[in-house]
Amino acid sequence: MKRLKCMLRLITPYNSNFMINKILLADSGAGQTEAMLRMLLEIPALQSAQVTLLHAVPPQITPEALSEKWEEGAKILASAMQSTHLDPSKVSTVLRQGDPKDVVCAVAEELETDLIVMGSRGLQKLRAILENSVSQYVFQLSSRPMLLVKDDIFVKRIGRILVAIDKSDSTQRCLNLALFLANGLQGAQIILTHAGSKDSYSKAEDDPALAGAIARVKQIGIPYRCFSSTEKPGPTLCAVAEETKSDLMILGSPDRRPSIAKSLVDLDRLLGGSTSDYVRINAACPVLLERIPA
């Protein structure tokens, strides 16, 4: 890809005050979310986190169908407990009836969840609406950070963490989250990426948008690489993730809707008009979307 410049620095481990204490896994019984949770819980900074396994039972037409779905949901949660090898003292299960997207949002708020983990089929634009994409709607309506794991992506471990950098307030929050996850993580590397730059630089480190993040990572002591590009953010972030074989991408997604519309879905984003939606569909790694208040 055009105008990507890279630089590598090897430095030392980090300490952070950022915390993720509560993880909510919305388990549909399909995809790679359980495997992703196992990988997350191998990260030193997350090993003390409390985990809630949630399965939503959709409304049914007949009592018989509802009973069958309740039984199926209970089996899914029991299987998740087994496959993730969770410490019983640090995990709880929730089986609740209702529209899955509404249930996930409600439980996340009730538990004051720090991170929602969900599967994603990576549906293209209009299909996300027509096929009632739960992950897309939850991201639209929840104020919580959300980790989307596409059904066709399997991550063996978390090591290389790509952080989308720009001049907005989201950069600091996303960088804090990346550094928190990298704390004590063997082989961790932060990949700082600024896409959509107005100017081209011979070295990525000369990009002013990256300067603050680079200085902080150097000061703290995490191995890093940095990229700067004048290309569009969505394609650039996906290309860098593939080139560097990133295990996780973190980017902010501001909610600029007026307060009266906070409970409504942003059709522009659902139709693919945002960087986060492009990345959700095309990234070759799990994507952690940090919801940034307007």
Image: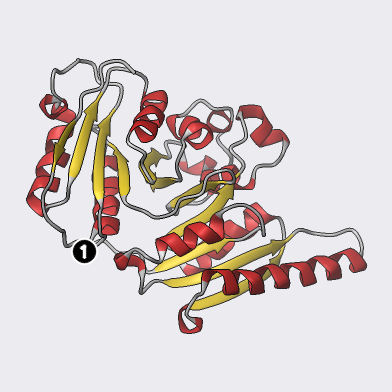
Q: Residue at x 39, y 39 (%)?
A: 254
Type of amino acid at the residue the image marks with label 1: Asn
State left or right for residue 288 relative to residue 130.
Answer: left
- Residues 8 and 118: in front is 8
Kindly identify the residue that appears in the image at 25 percent across and 21 percent down: 197
Name the image quarter holding residue 205: top left
- Asked if residue 292 lies left or right of residue 6, the reply is right
Is residue 168 left or right of 52 when viewed as pictured? left
Say if residue 249 shows up in the picture.
yes
Dot 1 corresponds to which residue?
17
Q: Is residue 4 above or below residue 52?
A: above
Residue 6: image location, x then y, percent: 20, 29
When the figure is inspected, residue 56 is found, relative to residue 143, above or below; the finding is below
Residue at 22% x, 63% y: name it. 184
Q: Percent position (x, y) of residue 82?
A: 59, 74
Could you tell me which quadrant the N terminus lies in?
top left
- 120 sits left or right of 294 in the view: right
Colour theme: secondary structure
